[in-house]
Image (spheres, coloured by chain):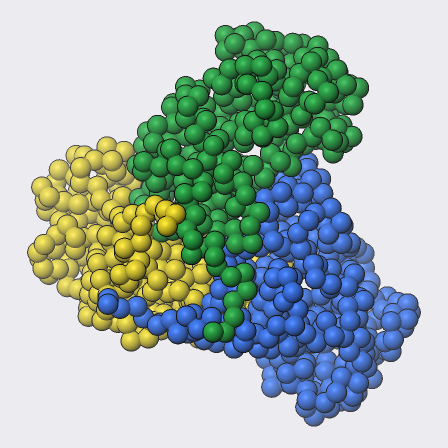
Chain colours: A blue, B yellow, C green
């Protein structure tokens, strides 16, 4: 499941070097979205298909913007309008898309393993944009980028607490793999029903009390309570959950003074995070979203252009483009 | 709520000069959509997000075409696919979109005030594409453009009758503000339940009889009976409404001989307007739609490019573009 | 209903010469989708509206990719988001779209005749992407292209068996017209309830037994059992249908040794075609999909650019484009 040159199916097994190259590229692309002319010619004539069998605003939009800012043609397909509604298998739908010669298919699917399966049946690059409760690697990469921008110490000196519905969270799993590979210390916290013992094998410490988990933490990553993916009742009520696990100012006070707080969104205010904290000075949630576009630009570029792995963002820039006048005039 | 340089939230408070600049720019852009190569480079590298929490064909399509003809990247987000379905607040969804560095968010929303609220929480330009029963300023501007193209007299010499469900109509409100600011005489007509006395304060004359309202009018603007926005019964039946307020040839005959008839669409044939009139020689409904693209091109351009307020459409044109051959050949 | 220079409403009445020109152009465009830079400037500044009142993945995506690879602006409109949900007539929706100056509207609609009707009320080019059980000409053209690529003999020496729900199939009708015009021998096969006698008038032979129909055939074209378009029960059960009409290896063995097998998709595995056959060596289903993009590029180009009928694909290519470096560098 390594990145290699073709797919990003998950962060499990991806090397620290591959991750670092991606973060470096993304870092140099962050400023592209702040320019007057937010457009690079790097993927002109390439086709990126966003194939979303599960609803999504931010991830689908982030990939679409990333593709367009690199001048690729972006095509979006949602489950509702798909032939799968006519009884076609997922494999057949995917092979049909692949037959139209896309350079990359970005896939979100409710079934764990869907992205890997796709990579085994089609020819083009596959990016996993979230598959069931398995992995959501681009979310983890943008989280890593956001952490690296704010924390100047080495990864091995960082304590990251991930709090919430661990067992169902593809975000938690991808972050766990990425953070452990880079050497960070990872604490997982949640009610026992949502935090199985098996997670210790990945090198994480488990906490059933959020207070202890965030004690002295450099980074707190809150997870969304995903009603839509919870098959049965894992805790008595949302209120009960919020009472014990909602991140509020009091709990934040137990972390390091320069703690940063992440959340993959969409947030449930008052359930897993208080508005005071989500909108407060330690929150970097909006930076995560901005970094998401840069990270996905870096990833699309590196997967689609052969041999581009070591490239830096500045090399993506054509002088003609950066020099383009914001306001065209008659000669 | 003035236009200023950043937002268009409504026409209430927008100056006659700002309106005139917009109409002038739009006027010069009308011919772009008639060219062989309907494309200007003006907004290359800019991102326009169409965020439609309410369904729409013509307005969403019109904005998307306008953005693309100016070479902007256009991203469309509908409510159905949005994270709001997962319980995210409108503000959080909007802030997330804004974090991806769009240059402009075009928003349609069922709640009055939604666009203004958005402008208060995000950084980029906001265009109101219809918010509840509050305003729909781009519709009014394209109506003003359509009127100005056909009527060569001064605004103060024009009599405009707006007929239908006034109280629920954002189109009526925006037109009322725009027309009054430019100096036109405005008559509002509808059943008393749909035409509150308070509208007199904006300088309109009120009529409860369509025949008197259109008597000697230069312009008749019919409104759509919006079933989906009518909370309760404001008139006995649609047939009853049609009998008294449907614009038919007999009623048109009471207006000026060169009257023009507008409707924002989608039209309910036989309810507020007869097919004979909608498709007849006085109807300028299709011109309204064509003008909508030009008007939205002008607006996007003026909001997104700083200092562009006084520009004329001809300045948008790069020689290289106008000279582009319609049919490429091997050298 | 001839192609002429403006519309493609069906293949009934389109000349062999027009079909051949389209296939020749498409043939030369096939390789564009295999290039590093899959983009030609041919339709820059043109607007293509995909107006899909019926759901579709492959056809809508195929047209969208085709338009974008020719540098056109592509706008997609689905029925769900359309004003038709607000009670607007199909004609009014179409006229509104046309007023925004698209160069071509691609329409799919559940009513037979919808595309032809559209062509009668709007100004721009219309492409029928499937109307009820009437015609689906671009599917037939891509089928013809796929057959021509694999079979080097003259059309008159080919035996093509079309099998399944003939009476409801727009794909069958369009292929029947196209194949007969080119001179091929066409056999139609299906249960008597789905294969009316009247089809003989178009020059087809009728078979009520699939085994006899495929005997010695060069091409077998299987049709999808379209549950969603079948008004009542035309056969006892799906199992019953599958037992007699499912194309399996045993039946394929009765065809020519170099038979090719087509299916328009989405396929119902185990109903009209066995997985063994669909994924087997005679299947050209994925080639059909790939050819679909090339065929639609050819068609969009020939309809939109006046006088382009005789053009070959190589003439579409600008040296500047083919020479564009896949990877941009700092000068």
Dividing the image into 4 quarters, which one contains the N terminus of chain B?
bottom left
Left or right: A260 in relation to A11: left
Please report the residue visible at 68 percent of the width from the left and 55 percent of the height from the top: A126
Would residue C52 be visible to someone looking at this image?
A: no
Examine the rendered structure and indicate whether residue A149 appears above or below residue B67: below
Furthest-front residue in this view: B331
Residue at figure coordinates x 61%, y 9% from the top left: C206
Residue B209 location (% of width, % of height): 21, 45
> Vertical placement of C219 versus A117: above or below?
above
Residue with the most extreme bottom position:
A257
A9 or C108, nearer to the observer: A9
Q: Is residue C98 above or below residue A262?
A: above
Q: Position of residue A307 (x, y in %)?
A: 65, 65
Q: Is residue C25 visible?
A: yes
Q: Is residue C233 above or below residue B142?
A: above
Q: Is residue C35 left or right of residue C238?
A: left
Residue B183, given in percent of the width and then of the height, sits at 15, 63
Q: Residue at x 31, y 58 (%)?
A: B321
Residue C127 on image: x %, y %? 42, 34
> Number of marks in the image?
0
In the depicted view, which residue is nearer to us: C173 or A136? Answer: C173
Could you say which is closer to the camera, residue C317 or residue A144? C317
- Name which quarter of the figure residue A66 lies in: bottom right
Which residue is drawn at the image coordinates 72% and 43% (left, top)? A91
């Amino acid at each position: 499941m390594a990145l290699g040159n073709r797919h990003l199916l998950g962060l499990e097994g991806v090397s620290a070097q591959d991750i670092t190259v991606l973060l470096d590229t993304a870092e140099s692309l962050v400023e592209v979205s702040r320019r007057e002319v937010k457009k690079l010619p790097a993927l002109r004539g390439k086709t990126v298909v966003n194939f979303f069998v599960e609803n999504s605003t931010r991830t689908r939009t982030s990939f679409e913007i990333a593709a367009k800012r690199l001048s690729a043609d972006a095509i979006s397909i949602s489950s509702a309008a798909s032939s799968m509604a006519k009884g076609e298998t997922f494999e057949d739908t995917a092979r049909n898309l692949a037959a139209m010669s896309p350079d990359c298919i970005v896939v979100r699917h409710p079934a764990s393993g869907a992205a890997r399966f796709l990579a085994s049946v089609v020819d083009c690059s596959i990016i996993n944009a979230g598959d069931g409760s398995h992995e959501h690697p681009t979310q983890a990469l943008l989280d890593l980028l956001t952490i690296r921008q704010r924390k100047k110490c080495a990864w091995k000196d960082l304590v990251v607490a991930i709090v919430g519905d661990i067992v169902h969270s593809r975000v938690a799993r991808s972050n766990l793999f990425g953070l452990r590979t880079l050497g960070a210390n990872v604490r997982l916290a949640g009610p026992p029903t949502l935090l199985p013992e098996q997670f210790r094998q990945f090198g994480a410490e488990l906490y059933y009390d959020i207070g202890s988990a965030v004690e002295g933490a450099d980074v707190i990553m809150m997870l969304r309570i995903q009603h839509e993916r919870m098959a049965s009742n894992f805790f008595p009520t949302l209120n009960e959950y919020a009472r014990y696990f909602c991140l509020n100012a009091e709990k934040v006070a137990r972390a390091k003074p320069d703690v940063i707080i992440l959340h993959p969104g969409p947030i449930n205010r008052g359930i897993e995070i208080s508005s005071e904290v989500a909108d407060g000075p330690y929150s970097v949630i909006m930076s995560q979203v901005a970094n998401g576009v840069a990270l996905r630009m870096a990833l699309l570029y590196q997967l689609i252009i052969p041999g581009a792995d070591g490239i830096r963002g500045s090399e993506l820039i054509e002088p003609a483009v950066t020099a383009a006048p914001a306001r065209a005039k008659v000669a």
